[in-house]
Structure formats: structure tokens, C-alpha cells
Amino acid sequence: MAVKNVLEAVRDTLFEAMGRDQRVMVLGEDVGRHGGVFNATQGLYEAFGEDRVVDTPLAESSIVGIAIGAAFGGLLPVAEIQFADFIHPAVDQIINEAAKIRYRSNGDFGCPIVIRVPYGGGVHGGLYHSQSVEALFFSTPGLKIVAPTTPADVKGLLLAAIYDPDPVIFLEHKASYRAIKGEYPEGEFVLPIGPADVKRAGTDLTVVSYGMTMHYALQAAEELSREEGIEAEVIDLRTLLPLDRRTIVDSVKKTGKLLVVHEDNLTGGVGAEVAATVADEAFMYLDAPIRRLAALDVPSTPYHPALERAMLPSKAQVKEAILELARY
Amino acid sequence: MPKEIVMPKLGESVVEGVIGRWLKAEGDFVDVDEPLVEVDTDKVNAEVPSPYRGVVHRLLAREGETVAVGQVIAIILEEGEAAPEAGGEQPAAAAQVAGEPRAAAREEALNGAGPARSRSPHAYSPAVRRLAAESGIDPATVVGTGRGGRVSKKDMERAIADAGARAKAAPPAPAPGLLDADEVVPITRMRRTIAERMVQSKRTVPHAWTMVEVDVTRLVEWRESIKEEFRRREGFNLTYLPFVVKAAVEALREYPILNSTWEEDRIVIKRRINIGIAVDVDDGIIVPVIRDADQKSIVGIAREIADLAARARAGTLTPDDVAGGTFTINNTGAFGSILSAPIINYPQAAILSMETITKRPVVVGDAIAIRSMMNLCMSLDHRVLDGAVCGRFLRSVKRRLESYDANTPLY
């Protein structure tokens, strides 16, 4: 099996999907001739032509609107928002249109679009190239939100998202693009949207995360296993909406302790919902307060490297939080 | 600046404490009010909370070490603070902070929320409660390894596994195994403490035992004649115990060797006479102390007994109330007993028990008379005391009790 990084996994999966199915198309700013600002669509324009690889104006609302229209016309569009920070003009199209079509049409129409959204900080991107936007869409029934960060999960969930009959926001963490490498499954490899993945089994506490902080948790868990004999169970949500409550609750019933880590702000984040679910469904199994580790509640990610480090959860912080909770 | 933690004053009269167990190791993070160390005084094991937030830099006293109040026992650094050079500016810091932990500990003791009442300040987590309910194992009997000695889910699981292993290991039939109808009573902390102290006393102290009969007829008549008025005036019952305490205290002044402690290479005769009074409470006994009982009147002693007993039953005694006893008196007569062989309240040298007063035919002169009689029983540490001095002591107590009548000053 080939080893690829996350970016290559995105590109190669799009290439495979477009090669196999004429209905799959991509659109977005600079996705065509330029190959995308991160090279995620490099080579698609040359291989599949301008009808299926469409450069759009710098107008996110129209990118999503066009994708919705193309989906109604029978295509399977994959729209790219160049940076998550610029998704806000498209919110009306996403929340008011795409997310509500199935409900509004009493189930007659779906909206099979994928919105690829590079997101996340730790890349020295400043205020407008660093944001996490999942909480903005997390309370919108009708949407699915996936956030895989391994090459295999990216392939399996991107294919699933393309063929999902409803709109899927596909979050790609920018810091994972080149930093995270792993096996890339050949051929037909589809993962269901929904189930979380226990990336590391453990007995002492449960760490629920996704995105880059999930990798921090995995690394910290391995180190703490070696250094302290602490065995943390690390759950990669992969899909944020719908939330895999069962896997989370089952794990906490086993370990009795929960730490939720994400790069999005603390307040109103996915972690709050995870914590509430566990408090609700596993209360009698809790052996410690539920802990959350998340970015500081500040308006955006600062540009200064020291401030950026201070604002975002680090591997060291994750490790400390695991240790603290394990010793509680 | 490094912060110094000093041995707190856990009660007004306490001048030293023994480091029971460190709850933090060097390098551990500690938050404000998080338990830092268990300090044992005579009767109470108190958890001392940290007055500072930071990282434990040095622990300066060993577990089991006796440390004077005010002596520095640990140094805490602020997070990220560099370790200080040896020497340096510490004395100034000590002077500045010495009062605070003391005040904090005292406040806790006075509020009754802290050290005085319990070794386990933690509420049990839902998981621990669930496992306790499922297994029938009381978490209070489980050794906690969580933060600050908290009983964790893992501790419960270990205890359940151990209990299971023990049950399996035990031979099934004739052994002292459980029959279907047997009830298993979990051991409370107080029960365990009592057990440990009793075993310690019985194992280390060679007990000898003696008894005298006391004719308290005149005391009974006197008390009967004044008890109603006493109650009206003072607001509590006048029992026989204060009279026995008074007589014993006076006899102790006469024979101070009974007010002493065996300390392996020497015997220490205590200058102050602090009388422990055994009070039965819900799940055991506790022994609060009448301090300087030799300087108090019968009413003063009576009032103090009433107060201590009430607070013992309410669970609001402070460490000070149970510390520093030098001799113990046990009112076994309250249960109707006429004879008992008490276990010495270690490390004291002797214990006296007063038995119930009964009317008996006794020989007075050459006649038989009906008299109110009470037995006084005493156990003694035969390393310190011999029968002769104890006999003289008991005769002194007896003579005093038999002399009490309406002419004896109550106040």
C-alpha cells in the first residue's frame, strides 16, 4: 500500500472519483489552471478539462450556489472554499438552501454537494487563514460535517461525501496536508460517514478529538504509555455531524474519564456537545470531571508566532491534560 | 519567589505534628486548597491544604517525622519559576508567610469542615458510588490512590477484584467463610482507627489490672438532694463522672507517676493533667480531653464534659479537643457494667473505668448494711507502674470519693 500525505490523498481521491464517474466535477477559486492554492486539484484541469474543473469568481456565495444548481442538474459537485475563513459569504447558501432542501421538499430532493474547506491554524496564517469554522455549522441539522486527518480516512470519507445524497462539509486541516502521512488504500475504499474511529485503545481515560489535535493526543498518549504507563484511549471523531455518541459513551463507560480536545474555540464548540452527551448518558460511570482543552476564546488566531502558540492547544498541553486527568 | 509551607498549628495547644503522608511529591503541581500533606496529631489525622498554587519544589520533612509548629516542611515554586539557590532570601519569606497556613487550618477546624472531622474530604465520584452499590464494598475502607488520596474507580475495581480473589481463595465449607445469612459490615474509618489503636496498645503495652470497691452512699445521697436544683440552675445533668474525674485528678497530683508515658529509654511524667473522657458516638468512641483538669472545680469539669460529649456526638470536635490527653477515664457504668478491664489509651500509662453504682449488702463494722457501691477498675502499663503504687492511687481515689458529701465544694 502506498504511503501518501493528506494533500496527496485529497488530490488522488478526486482524480480517482472523476476518472470513474463523469458526474463528479470540481469548482472553486483557482482550482483549474492553477491547481488550487494548496495544489489539491493539481492535474485535474489537464486530465478532465474546463467543463469539469471550473475556475470561479472570487465569490463564495456563488461557488456554493452554483454547486447546488449543478447538483439539481444531476452532477456530483465538489466545491472548494479556498480558506475556511472565507466561507462566511456562503453561509446563506449552505444553511438556508443546501441544508434544508431535503426537509423542505418532504424528502423528494437531496443536495449531493461536497464543500471542501481547508481550515485550521498553526500555519502562521494570521487572522484570515487560520480559523476553525465547524462550530458555525455544527448546530445545523441537514448538514453533515466530516473532518478526517489521515490519508486513508480522507480517501474513504471523501468518496463517501461525494456519493452522499445530502450536503457534506469536508474539513481539511491545512497543517495536516504535508505533515500527516500514512497508508493510502488503493481502489474502491469508502468509509461510512458517522462512525468515529478508536485510533488508540486504552483503559485509563478517553480522549475525544479530531483534526490536528487528534494527532497531538495520539502522540501524547504514546509518550505517556512509555513514560508513565498511562493508557489513554484516543477517539478520532472523523465525522462531527452526525456525532457518534455511542462510541464516545461506550468508551467513557469503560474508562470513567473524558478529555475533549479541539482547535476550535472552547465556548460552544463540538467539545461542549460531547461533554453534555457523556454527562447525560454516562453520568454514573464518571470518575472525574469532564475536561475540555480547546483554543482560547479570542476573535481569531493571532499572527505573532508566540501569540499563535499561546492561543492554540499544543501537544504539550494535551499531554499535560491527559496526565492531570489520569492522576485525578 | 519561593513560598514556604510551615507545619500548621492544628489546635491551640498543639506544638508539633507528625508528617503522616505526603500527598504530593517533589515536582507535582498543587493548586490552592488542594491537600498537600496529612499531619497526625494525637487523635486526629488532618489533611493540610496548600495555601499556594505552584509546583512542589522540596519536601523538607520525612513521613513519620515529628516537626515543630512553624517549621518549614515544604517549598513551593510558582509555575515556571526557577529553583532558588541554596540559602538566599528564604528567612524573609518564612516570616512573611508563616501565619497563613496556620490561620487557614484553624479556620477549617473551627468550621468543622476540614481536618477535624475526616481524613477523606473527597466526595465519591459517580463511578465509585455505582461500584460501591454494585459490590457492597464501602469506599471508605478502600485505600485511595487518586489525587489527594481520592478513592478512584480503579481503586474500587482493585478492591472488588481483591475481595473476589479472597472469596475464591477461602476454602468453601467449614472455614470462617460466610454463610448465607451472614451479614457483611464494611469497616468505617473510625472503626479502623479504633482497631489499629487497640491492637497497638495491646501489642506493645503489658497490661495489668486491678480493682477497688468504693462506698459512694454519701455521694449518692448528696447528689440526689441537689440534682434537680443543679439542673435548673446550670441547664445540664449532674452525673457521677465529674466527681470521679475530680477524685482521680487529685489522686494523680498525689501520685504523678500515673500521669506518665513510657518512651522506650525513659519515662516522661507529664506536668499537666489532661483527662480523656471516652464518649460513645454512632460508630465508635472518641476521647475528647478536659485540659488542666486539676485546675477546675467539679462544676467546671461537669460543664466541660457535657460540652465535649455534645460536640463529640455532633461531630464538631476540633483537633485541639482530642489532643494531649495524659490519663483516661471511661464510664463503663453507663452501660450497666460492674466490672471491666479497659485497654490503655496508648501511650498513656493507665486507664480508669468507673462501674455502675449498685446497692449491695456490705459489712460495716460488725453489721451488714445496704450501701451504694461502685467498682473502680484500672489497667496499667506494667513497664511504668507496679501494683503497689496503683493500689495506693486507687485507695486515694476511693478515700476522696467516699468523703464527698454536702460539705464538699461544688464550685
Image (spheres, grey):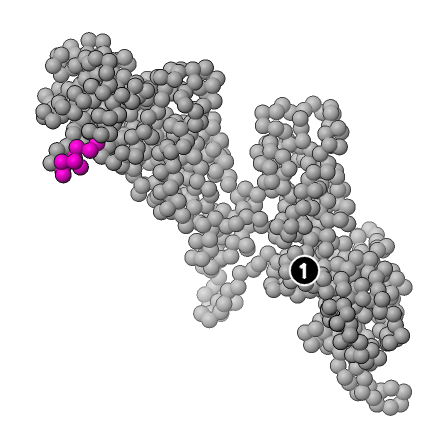
Q: Which residue type carries mark 1? A: Arg
Q: Nearest the camera: A201 or A283?
A: A283
Q: Nearest the camera: A31 or B393?
A: A31
Q: Nearest the camera: B307 or B204?
A: B307
For the point 46% across and 30% down, the residue is A319
Res A159 → quadrant: top left
Left/right placement of residue A4 relative to residue B405 reads: left
Magenta residue span: A98-107
Res B180 → quadrant: bottom left
Res A221 → quadrant: top left
Vertical arrangement, residue A65 with respect to residue B131, above or below:
above
Residue A104 in the magenta stretch? The answer is: yes
Q: Chain of mark 1?
A: B
Left/right placement of residue A159 relative to residue B198 reads: left
For the point 73% across and 32% down, the residue is B96
Q: Quadrant of the N terminus of chain A?
A: top left
Residue B218 position, x and y percent, is 84, 79
Residue A260 position, x and y percent, is 40, 35
Residue extending furthest bottom?
B367
Residue hosting label 1 = B311
